[in-house]
Amino acid sequence: MSTLFTDIGELWVFDSEAGTSVLRDAALVVDDARVAWYGAAADAPEADDRVGLEGRAVLPGWVDSHSHLVFDGDRSAEFEARMAGQSYAAGGIAVTTDATRAASDARLRELVAARVREAQRGGTTTLETKTGYGLTVDDEARSARIAAELVDEVSYLGAHLVPAGWDADDYVDLVVGDMLEAVRPHVSWIDVFCEEGAFDPEQSRRVLEAGRAAGLGLRVHGNQLGESGGVQLAVEMGAASVDHVNFLADADIEALAASPTVATILPACDLSTRMPFAPARRLLDAGANVAIASNCNPGTSYTSSMNFCVGTAVLQQHLTLEEALRAATLGGAFALRRTDVGTLRVGARADLHVLDAPAAIHLAYRPGMPLTHQVWRAGARIA
Ligand SMILES: [Zn+2]
């Protein structure tokens, strides 16, 4: 079964080898859940089915490479207090941990499923999410299992914070021991919050080394609140990504530019915490790989809107439209070491994000407007 999408006003094809091409008056053919052809609408081949898009822009579906969707509990009062002048401290996570542990499996599953649907309605077709609100062996394993049922890529973040009453080194022993063994069947990545108030670089190294020994890919939360050493550790250990990257020394930028480790910026989180934006312009100018992700979580960034993140990166972080779109598609895919998504090259999974606009610049030009018109994943319409 093949489908011709035609009358596309602007088609963005990101290709890690051929670069970015933007076609106008374009068409695209999907066959067997893959992109089979794209080009000028006038040259389009026949197909079994036909979808006319009336001049709308088409992008690859967003690849959101950083979220925390497995949680229960409400943190809106904490957010309101922070907006009234209190500063963010990592300890607020404990509120979510208590509520998550208390939730039934069915409730937690329904909460995650609802959040996945919400992300899909916003144009996201590939999603990573993390454990990290269980922080006991059983609760982390349960979070990992539920996440793996509903989300493409799951990261084990037992090292999210040191739970109350624990010595940090003793807790790391648990994270790299029984807890890792319990989550291992459900996850493909390990992550660690390398930050003052969470885990120092040596503790973080232990977590990553244990994950690597267990066959997991590596990710790091680093340099969110200060120059935590997370970037240097991530690069040294060959992590796929280091995320947040708000506070970077020149040596951090140079290390990222010389490595395949992706610097993932989280614009909605920076706004929501009123932190200085990550220096994305400096990273791109230096030649680093950059991804944009939502960091959807109840404490510091309760949005999965990649449209909003892309618009903010253009408006506030001075990315060009092309850089921002690429970071939220191909950049996210590279951060997850995926080659089948984040691109509309021939052979890619047919993940299409149709905008209710003739050009993608509307994401920044009309911020906050409901611009996602249709979402297709692997050739099937999901929103
Ligand atoms: Zn995070």
Image (cartoon, grey):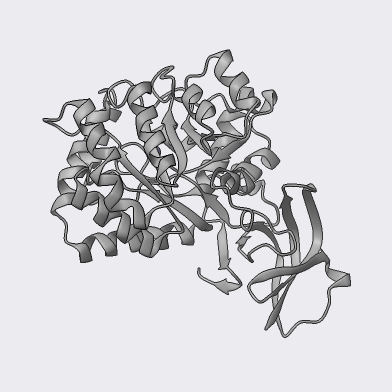
Q: Is residue 175 left or right of residue 201?
A: left
Task: Report the image quarter containing ligand 1.
Answer: top left
Q: Quadrant of residue 48?
A: bottom right
Please give the name of the residue rendered at 47% of the width and 61% of the height, measured from the top-left corner: 120
Whether residue 73 is visible, yes or no, is no
The residue lying furthest to the right in this view is 43
46 over 184 or under it: above or below: below
Q: Please state, as top left, top right, bottom left or bottom right, where the N terminus lies in the image.
A: bottom right
Please give the name of the residue rendered at 41% of the width and 25% of the height, measured from the top-left corner: 224
6 over 371 or under it: above or below: below
Q: Quadrant of residue 315?
A: top right
Please give the name of the residue rendered at 28% of the width and 63% of the height, measured from the top-left corner: 109
Camera-side residue of 180 and 235: 180
Camera-side residue of 120 and 175: 175
The residue lying furthest to the left in this view is 165
289 over 351 or under it: above or below: above
Task: List x then y, in percent, for residue 26.
Answer: 80, 64
Task: List x then y, in percent, for residue 34.
Answer: 67, 69
Q: Quadrant of residue 321?
A: top right
Whether residue 96 is visible, yes or no, is yes
